[in-house]
Image (tube, grey):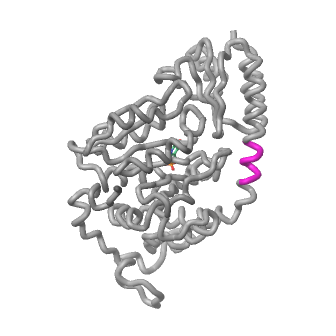
Amino acid sequence: MFNLNNILRENIKNLTPYSSARDEFQGEASVYLDANENAFGSPLDEPYNRYPDPLQYNVKKRLSEIKGVPVRNIFLGNGSDEAIDILFRSFCNPGVDNVILVPPTYGMYEVSANINDIKTKKVSLTEEFQLNLEGIAEEIDQNTKLIFICSPNNPTGNSINRDDVETLLNNFDGIVVVDEAYINFSRQKTFIQELTEYSNLVVLQTLSKAWGLAGLRVGMAFASEEIIEVMNKVKPPYNINESSQQLALKALANVEQVNNWIKETLAQRDKLVLSLKDLDFVLDIYPSDANFILVKTTDPKGIYNFLVQKGIIVRDRSKIDLCEGSLRITVGTPAENEILIDTLKNFK
Ligand SMILES: *Cc1c(COP(=O)(O)O)cnc(C)c1O
């Protein structure tokens, strides 16, 4: 049975969080002399002289409406990368605990583990890029705190079987992190509606991909109220700056625009797949639920370098186990995709 107190680090359990000026007085006042801000203003047009809302209520309120998840179940990070780091710092004792990773997958889980001095146990995905549940079960020990599942998976593009993720959620006493950075492009259902079902579930999403806001650095974690409280305690007090909060709020009014881009991206992805199939150095194109495709080729390095010479940058993933020979290609605009295909036709 999952019990948050069993997996929480002792120092975090006992932590008195930093109490900011904005925490200690909430409400409206006419004279704020509590935070050592510049009372005259900022050299910009906006009142950036004031500290931002530490808990980003307005942004969360809007996200809550869009996602159908209560505000108390939402955490915002300076990118989802910050949420990943905070999960390590909340639950994993450096030099003692471990987490399970299922490569090939997103590289930040391992980097973040290394920064926090947390051991990683790797259980490769199967040839079909699905979970090896038996392998995972064998690796779990009493110091295993987190399992990271990326679905749709980066760099392979496929979704992980939902039943398998549920098997983990039902049987693992630690936290299962489901990274849904690419969920907007997927035919699969999100896990954020399952928070009441699974107290050990953390779902990560981001404004960096489909929402087109990678530059703002706003990532989301959805989890039980208890887990969110811990993450809020551990995060830096003002982790989302005021301009990012304002701009995110403004952007979140444009759901329709984003949905149109998603449709266009999916149509472009299908078109790209058809064009790539015709190239004789393309050996395989893996099914994608994301805004990129993994393409197995006869000469990844040669193609990569050829494209760089022509000013086109893709990602060489050929050194990664199970991705031998493969390039990861992000779906671009119709014009960009056409340039890519026209250029590739001239390779060799
Ligand atoms: C791009 C990506 C993210 C996003 O990270 P941000 O810090 O929110 O920009 C998270 N997870 C995966 C798997 C990604 O590919």
User: Which of the 4 image quadrants contains residue 313?
Assistant: top right
Q: Dividing the image into 4 quarters, which one contains the N terminus?
A: bottom left
Give the position of the C terminus as an image quadrant. Answer: top right
Q: Residue furthest bottom?
A: 30
Q: Give me the residue at 21% from left, 60% from top.
A: 11
Q: Position of residue 141 (x, y in %)?
A: 27, 41
Residue visible at 55% across and 48% down in the picture: 180
Query: Which region is colored magenta?
Result: 259-265
Which residue is at a point 36% across and 54% down the rendered structure image? Answer: 86
**Going by the image, does 291 lie left or right of 151?**
right
Nearest the eye: 242 or 26: 26
Indicate the position of residue 299 as horizontal and vertical percent values: 59, 13
| As drawn, 17 above or below 3 | below
- Looking at the picture, tell me which residue is in the foreground, 199 or 84: 199
Apparent side of residue 240 relative to residue 23 in the rendered image (left or right) = right
Q: Position of residue 293 (x, y in %)?
A: 64, 31
Most extreme residue toward the top is: 348
User: Does residue 68 lie above or below 143 as drawn?
Assistant: below
Q: In the image, is 261 to the left or to the right of 148? A: right
Q: State the residue at coordinates (31%, 56%).
A: 90
Q: Main secondary structure of the magenta part?
A: helix
Residue 24 figure quarter: bottom left
- Looking at the picture, how far across and down is residue 110, in whole percent? 38, 38
Which quadrant would residue 247 be assigned to in this image?
bottom right
**In the image, residue 192 lies in the stretch drawn in magenta:** no
Please count the marks in the image. Answer: 0
Camera-side residue of 91 and 44: 91
